[in-house]
Amino acid sequence: MRIGYADPPYIGCSHLYRDHPDFAGEVDHAHLIRRLEADYDGWVLHTLATPQAIALLAPLVVETGARWMSWTKGFAAFKRNVSVAYAWEPVIVKAARKPVVSKRLVMRDWIECSITMKRGLTGAKPEAVCHWAFEMLGARPEDQLDDLFPGTGAVQRAWETWKGKFVLPPAFELVPTPHAKGE
C-alpha cells in the first residue's frame, strides 16, 4: 500500500518557515487533499485546532472517509498574550486498511505526547505521535511511506524505527549440544 504523510505548515503559519529551503508560501489544502486521495491508499494530515483551519478542512475531508483524531500535548509551548495554550491538534487519518488490535498499542483516536523541542523546525513531530499515526493507518512494514513535507526528516526516521518493531530476528540454526555423560 502507498501511505501519504502530510505535516504541512499550518493554515496561516507558513511565515514561520520562510527561511526553509523549500518554502513555497501557504499550502493549498484543497489541492493537497485531492492529491492524498488520488495517490495514496491511506494518509495522515496534521493541522491546527483553530476555527479557521477546521472550517476550511472539514468540507474537504467529509467525503474521504477519513477520521478526525487528536494529538493532546502534555507539555505545550505557551504563547505570549494567549491565555489558553494550544495544547492539542487535529490529526486527520484515512486508514489504508483496518488497524489491527495488538499488544503494541492501545487503540484510541487520540494520543497524549509532549511536543518536541529544538528539532530544527517548529512543529517537528515526536516519534511516538508518528508511531501512533502509523498504527491508526493500519500500516505494515512493507508499505511505501511518502513524507510530503519532510522538514527535519522526523517522520521518515519514525517510520524506520516503527518498521523495526515488526522485524523478526534473523533465523538461527539450532546446533545440537553434546549430552552429558549418562544422559
Image: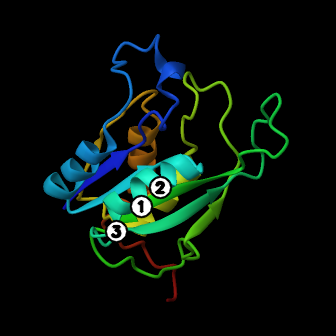
Judge left or right: residue 76 versus residue 41. Answer: right
Residue shown at 43%/15% (left/top)?
Answer: 20
Q: Is the residue marked by circle 3 packed among few (<14), some (14-19), or many (20+) residues within 10 Å? A: few
* Amino acid at the residue labelled 3: Val
Q: Which of marks 2 and 3 is nearer the N terminus?
A: 2
Rendered image: mark on residue 55: 2
Tell me the distance, in whole angstroms, between the alpha carbons under discs 1 and 2: 6 Å
* Amino acid at the residue labelled 2: Ala
Residue shown at 67%/42% (left/top)?
Answer: 115
* Amino acid at the residue labelled 1: Ala
Rendered image: mark on residue 58: 1
* 153 shown above or below 47: above
Residue 69 coordinates in the image, percent (x, y) = 52, 65
Residue shown at 80%/37% (left/top)?
Answer: 82
Viewer-proximal residue, 170 or 147?
147
Viewer-side label of 2, 3: 2
Q: What element carries label 2?
A: helix
Q: Is the residue marked by circle 1 packed among few (<14), some (14-19), or many (20+) residues within 10 Å? A: few
Q: Is the residue marked by circle 2 packed among few (<14), some (14-19), or many (20+) residues within 10 Å? A: few
Residue shown at 54%/35% (left/top)?
Answer: 124
Residue 131 at least partly seen: no
